[in-house]
Image (cartoon, helix red, strand yellow):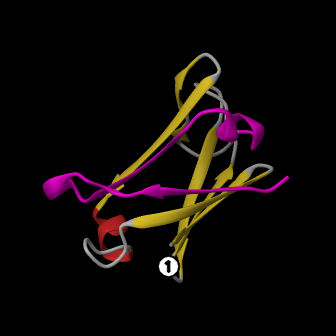
């Protein structure tokens, strides 16, 4: 299964930039509210989120509406304000790949 969506990157001031993804696409990819832990890696301009039972990051949200909220200075360095303001989010089984759009 592959599902792709473009989303805008938010700005969190001195806390960096924010990528917010939510909803049924996360569920279909195996990222469930309050249940799923995942690892995050950044390599060559790509952020990869992978379901990982040993990781500390956990999907938030309520019921069948999962939310992943990524905020950091690393995102700001990867996708500078005014240069890259939209990302492409690709959902597949147990993995999400985020790239500059």
Closer-to-camera residue (59/56)? 59
Residue at left 60%, top 33%?
23
Direction right: furthest residue = 1
Q: Position of residue 101 (x, y in %)?
A: 50, 72
In the figure, 75 relative to 70: above or below?
below
Taking the image as shown, residue 82 lies to the left or right of residue 65, namely: left
Look at the image and say whether residue 86 sits in the magenta stretch. no
Q: What is the count of numbered marks? A: 1
- The residues colored magenta run 1-30
Direction top: furthest residue = 63
Residue at left 37%, top 74%?
84
Q: Quadrant of residue 63?
A: top right
Residue at left 53%, top 42%?
56
Where does label 1 land, which residue? 45
Taking the image as shown, residue 53 lies to the left or right of residue 71, namely: right
Say which element carries label 1: loop
Q: Quadrant of residue 34?
A: top right
Local crowd size for mark 1, using a 10 Å CA cut-off: few (<14), some (14–19), many (≥20): few
Taking the image as shown, residue 37 lies to the left or right of residue 84, namely: right
In the figure, 87 relative to 63: above or below?
below
In the figure, 58 relative to 41: above or below?
above
Q: Position of residue 26 (x, y in %)?
A: 66, 40
Q: Position of residue 46 (x, y in %)?
A: 55, 73
Direction bottom: furthest residue = 44
In the figure, 59 relative to 1: above or below?
above
Q: Quadrant of residue 75?
A: bottom left
Taking the image as shown, residue 28 lies to the left or right of residue 57, namely: right
């Amino acid at each position: 299964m592959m599902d792709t969506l473009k989303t805008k990157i938010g700005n969190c001031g001195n806390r960096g930039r924010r990528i917010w993804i939510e909803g049924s696409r996360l569920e279909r990819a195996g990222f469930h509210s309050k249940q799923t832990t995942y690892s995050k890696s950044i390599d060559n301009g790509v952020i990869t989120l992978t379901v990982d039972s040993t990781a500390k990051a956990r999907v938030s949200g309520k019921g069948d509406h999962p939310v992943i909220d990524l905020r950091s200075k690393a995102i700001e360095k990867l996708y500078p304000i005014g240069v890259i303001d939209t990302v492409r989010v690709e959902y597949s089984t147990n993995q999400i790949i985020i790239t500059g759009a």
